[in-house]
Image (tube, coloured by chain):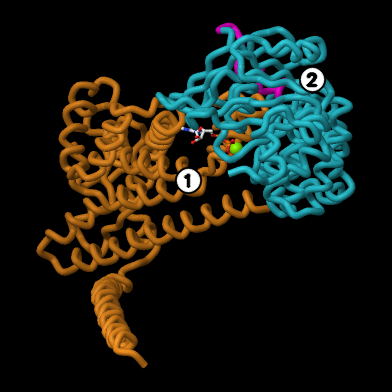
Chain colours: A orange, B cyan
């Protein structure tokens, strides 16, 4: 064996060692994450699980912790998120289609793309201030001021960048072959987008959408800014009605002195987590179903 | 009849084809940005015949093919100059809609690219979006029969097209192109991704199709060009090596046995390069 070979052997051992060290570090990193999450989860479950009941889910807030419930924030969250989706989905997907399929490829489009991505990183309270000014004040006649409508429009603005970016990714992943095949048959651009690009991109678009919804459902700051209430003993009866959402209610309970409210907060967190997990499960299910449909 | 084409005016003996040619490219130059890809190209494509485009890689065969159904329009900063006519109509006139051009002049791509949908839907979609009002089942069956695929897929029309083999997928793409009743079919190396048996099937199919359609096919395979085509156009890079052009065009037999241009002979006998 020549010297040269020995030199190679030596390096190989070192490379393996480096690889193994990195593997251990990566494993430690995921352990830290998982253990913290598990602790948090366990803590919340221990505090709140006993409080979860039909009564808790169907009662309005009250001054006495054992009679209080989360009906109004639960309904408020669901309505707010649904409306937000109704606003953000068509606008976001439309913008993504425009940017990917129609916009000329030039510096202006690139600039828009970069800025849309940047908007996804703007602190949510800024969106709250924007919503307060535009929807709650300027357009108060149409939105009813600090209303459910204002809340969902503000949140729609907040998630719009995420929806656009993820929809663009999904649309960009559609093989160009398919576009050419459609156009070569004498399809117009819209026929091509409608029948092939959108269905193909839909799993990705929906996944991005649902992740955006999951983010929005836990948001508090922008809604506090636009003036969502903390004590609501009624259900919204119109778009202009006032409302509250789960995280605000939870925050409110946590900041009370009585221990009973802290238990309520823990139970509220469990409900919020359950909604989040089901939304994520729904995202996975939808993705799977659309993919199956393409394969079948 | 073999024609030497390096001129900027119509070569005299090409005019023999004047009356039978449906597609004509006259003095065509194509640029990608500032780079010229085709220079002074003349090509007459006779009706109900198979015309093969051969030549080394990068000489602009695909570019020329895409001129005929305006697919070059889809490439940002591609520019087509010169006259390209279909039955006397300039395809690049401002009042010509490329969407309509593409229905009449269909295309089959190098890599089979069926839609990720059912076999039936692959064939039916083009007809539907073009406003076909007749019996769709019948149309699908007819197109699949003409593409010699019907017997293999008739029991699973609603299965996903991606489950077909490569050769079947390519015949499906041909059926899909036929279903919108084009008059010309452009094929860009339609068999290059297929094994020899699937390739022979496609070639048999082309011979049948030429009864109804005019076919222009790009191929890298000399034997294939010799086997299936009636006319052959030989493309090469110009002397300075910067753009492609048609150096020889004529009946296939003559191009292969008595080429006029020495470069054609070199290429055909494998001495090229
Ligand atoms: N979209 C494009 N943008 C810029 N240049 C291009 C584009 N398509 C082709 N070209 C250039 O034009 C020239 C001709 O390309 P073309 O694809 O027509 O050649 P070809 O004869 O079909 O080659 P092959 O046999 O390898 O398919 C090449 O130099 C290529 O680099
Ligand atoms: Mg090519």
Residues under labels 1 and 2: Cα distance? 40 Å
Is B24 magenta? The answer is no
Q: Nearer the viewer, residue A57 or A212?
A: A212
Circle 2: element type: strand
Q: Position of residue B193 (x, y in %)?
A: 68, 50
Whether residue A158 is situated above or below residue A71 in the rendered picture: above
Q: Nearer the viewer, mark 1 or mark 2?
A: 2
Q: Is residue A118 left or right of residue B42?
A: left
Q: Residues within 10 Å of mark 2 (few under 14, many from 20)?
A: many
Judge: label 2 CB < 8 Å from ligand 1: no
Q: Residue furthest bottom?
A: A1
Task: Tell me whether the residue at label 1 lies in contact with that at label 2, contact meaning CB atoms closer than 8 angstroms.
Answer: no
Q: Residues within 10 Å of mark 1 (few under 14, many from 20)?
A: few
Q: Position of residue B207 (x, y in %)?
A: 86, 35
Q: Position of residue B104 (x, y in %)?
A: 72, 20
Toward which corner of the image does residue B48 lie, by quadrant?
Answer: top right
Whether residue A274 is situated above or below residue A286 in the rendered picture: below
Is B103 magenta? The answer is yes
Q: Pointer 2 indicates a residue of which chain?
A: B
Q: Quadrant of the N terminus of chain A?
A: bottom left
The residue that label 2 is drawn on is: B46
Whether residue B40 is situated above or below residue A229 in the rendered picture: above
Whether residue A88 is situated above or below residue B195 in the rendered picture: above
Seen at 32% across and 29% down, the residue is: A109
Give the magenta-colored segment's residue range: B94-105
Residue B88 in sight from this viewpoint: yes
The residue that label 1 is drawn on is: A173
Seen at 41% across and 34% down, the residue is: A96
């Amino acid at each position: 064996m020549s010297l040269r070979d020995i030199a190679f052997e030596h390096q190989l051992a070192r490379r393996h060692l480096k690889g193994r060290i990195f593997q251990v570090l990566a494993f430690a990193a995921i352990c830290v994450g998982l253990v913290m999450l598990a602790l948090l989860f366990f803590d919340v479950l221990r505090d709140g699980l006993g409080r979860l009941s039909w009564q808790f889910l169907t009662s309005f807030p009250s001054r006495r912790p054992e009679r209080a419930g989360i009906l109004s924030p639960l309904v408020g969250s669901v309505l707010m998120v649904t409306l937000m989706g109704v606003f953000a989905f068509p606008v976001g997907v439309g913008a993504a289609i425009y940017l990917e399929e129609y916009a000329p490829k030039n510096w202006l489009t690139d600039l828009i793309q970069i800025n849309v991505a940047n908007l996804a990183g703007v602190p949510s309270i800024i969106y709250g201030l924007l919503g307060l000014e535009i929807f709650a004040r300027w357009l108060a006649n149409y939105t009813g001021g600090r209303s459910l409508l204002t809340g969902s429009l503000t949140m729609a603005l907040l998630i719009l960048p995420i929806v656009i970016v993820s929809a663009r990714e999904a649309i960009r992943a559609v093989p160009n072959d398919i576009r050419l095949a459609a156009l070569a048959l004498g399809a117009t651009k819209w026929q091509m987008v409608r029948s092939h690009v959108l269905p193909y991109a839909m799993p990705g678009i929906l996944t991005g959408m649902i992740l955006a919804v999951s983010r929005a459902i836990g948001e508090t700051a922008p809604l506090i800014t636009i003036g969502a209430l903390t004590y609501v003993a009624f259900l919204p009866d119109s778009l202009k009605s006032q409302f509250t959402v789960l995280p605000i209610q939870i925050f409110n309970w946590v900041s009370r002195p009585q221990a009973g409210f802290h238990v309520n907060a823990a139970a509220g967190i469990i409900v919020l987590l359950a909604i989040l997990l089901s939304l994520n499960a729904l995202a996975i299910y939808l993705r799977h179903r659309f993919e199956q449909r393409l394969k079948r | 009849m073999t024609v030497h084409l390096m001129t900027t005016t119509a070569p005299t003996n090409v005019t023999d084809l004047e009356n039978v040619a449906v597609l004509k490219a006259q003095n065509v130059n194509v640029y990608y940005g500032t780079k010229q890809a085709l220079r002074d190209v003349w090509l007459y494509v006779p009706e109900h015949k198979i015309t093969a485009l051969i030549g080394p890689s990068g000489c602009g065969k695909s570019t020329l093919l895409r001129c005929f159904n305006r697919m070059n329009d889809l490439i940002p900063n591609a520019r087509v100059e010169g006259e390209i006519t279909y039955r006397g109509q300039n395809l690049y006139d401002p009042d010509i809609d490329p969407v309509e051009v593409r229905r009449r002049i269909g295309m089959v791509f190098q890599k089979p690219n069926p839609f990720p949908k059912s076999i039936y839907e692959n064939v039916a979609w083009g007809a539907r979006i073009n406003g076909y009002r007749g019996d769709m089942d019948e149309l699908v069956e007819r197109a699949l029969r003409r593409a010699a695929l019907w017997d293999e897929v008739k029991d699973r029309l609603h299965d996903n097209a991606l489950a077909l083999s490569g050769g079947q997928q390519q015949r499906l793409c041909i059926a899909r192109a036929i279903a919108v009743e084009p008059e010309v079919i452009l094929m860009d190396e339609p068999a290059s991704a297929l094994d020899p048996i699937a390739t022979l099937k496609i070639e048999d199919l082309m011979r049948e199709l030429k009864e109804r359609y005019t076919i222009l096919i790009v191929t890298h395979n000399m034997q294939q060009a010799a086997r299936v085509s009636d006319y052959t156009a030989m493309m090469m890079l110009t002397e300075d090596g910067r753009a492609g052009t048609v150096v020889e065009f004529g009946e296939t037999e003559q191009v292969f046995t008595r080429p006029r241009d020495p470069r054609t002979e070199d290429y055909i006998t494998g001495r090229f390069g």
